[in-house]
Image: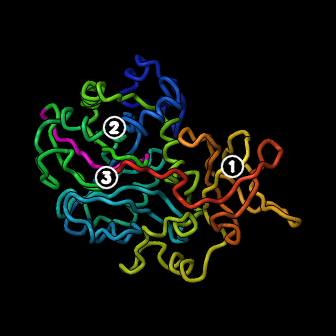
Amino acid sequence: MLKRTPLFETHRKLGGKLIEFGGWEMPVYYSSIMEEHQAVRTAAGLFDISHMGEVIVAGPQAESVLNGVLTNDLRKLAVGQGHYTLMCNEQGGVIDDLYAYRMNPTDFLLIINAARIEPDVAWLERCNAGRATLKNASAEYGALALQGPKSAAIIDPAFPSASCGGTLVPRASDLQKNQAGIFLHDYVTIYIARTGYTGEDGFEVVVPADHVESAWSRLMEAGWSHGLKPCGLGARDTLRTEVCYPLYGHELDEQTTPIEAGVGFFVALDKGEFTGRKVLARQKAEGVSKRCVAFRMTAKSAPPRPGYPIWNIGPDARRIGQVVSGTQSPSLGVGIGLGYVEPGFAKADTAIEIEIRGRRSPAVVVKKPIYRIKNVTV
């Protein structure tokens, strides 16, 4: 049986088209993917991300435990700051990619992927070995993502209370990128972080599960005059693909390393030992056998899709890789995607072909991101 978020009935009332996603019944769109995508790029969109997981790691050894498990360096985080990081196995493969926030000097909040909650928690418990307090709070919380250039104008009217923890900023709109604070909503504490998965300015709000519906209503009420629209998974995917954000199960998995995936910037090899470090350090020094590249189609064709073969061009044409994410870009009006290719074909401006329904169509490797945001000021 599929899991449902606290907003399931809200999605049905709004006419959301519901699909299965990672074991959850979630809206893929309400009006259309194109309309919702453009709302986020020009105004604001509101996503239900309550399917994602929350793990709290606390205690004097919490930082040490997490720094031995995660690739980024938590010692660099002040209270109220967060960053993107990855959790790897001994072979350097990615167990999950996540956000880690230091909410108090010895307390950390991890936001993890929905389909990875059980393996993540099991891995963390194994590596923790009782040294820190580790709590899987995923069932206790829901979460919302407010994204788009007008999100800062919406967040304060929706949650007008002053911050009561974290960065101690007076308003949520005073948060800087990747900062988080503790605020009040319906007399309960909530977490608000200035981050997101679309490339636009925005906020993610973590709320006790029985208050998610009121938080959604408060945001929709505050945002309707700014053009805020409810958005589904379809727009979330096209938005993140345009800015080349990885999706677990596509760009990332347990057989793929952060170096291969092109997110080596979030691997702090200089911080000391952590799980998978030896493999990642070797790949950094010696190179890899595959690289994740961004591409765009250069002629009219059907959109590229995951699993489609990638070919090089020339008399020695052969299959050199595979698409892992692909779509028709609503912002650019062309097919775009991400794929793994042999390193010799990973350089920007390399001409390639994508095999779409048995026919090869021309494309070109491009620098990431495929679509560049022009209106983010934080």
Q: Secondary structure at mark 3?
A: loop
Q: Earlier in the sequence, mark 1 or mark 3?
A: 1
| Residue range (magenta) | 187-198
- Residue 194 on the magenta segment: yes
- Residue at 65%, 44% in the rendered image: 335
- Measure how far apart labels 1 and 3 are at the Cα level: 30 Å
Q: Secondary structure at mark 1?
A: strand
Q: Position of residue 318 (x, y in %)?
A: 83, 62
Q: Position of residue 135 (x, y in %)?
A: 29, 52
Question: Position of 375 compared to 328: left or right?
Answer: left
Q: Look at mark 2 in the image and give the residue it sits on.
A: 144
Question: Position of 260 compared to 83: left or right?
Answer: right
Q: Look at mark 1 in the image and give the residue it sits on.
A: 297
Q: Look at mark 3 in the image and give the residue it sits on.
A: 377
- Residue at 43%, 55% in the rendered image: 120
Determine whether 202 is above or below 281 in the image: above
Q: Earlier in the sequence, mark 3 or mark 2?
A: 2
- For the question of whether residue 296 can be seen, the reply is yes
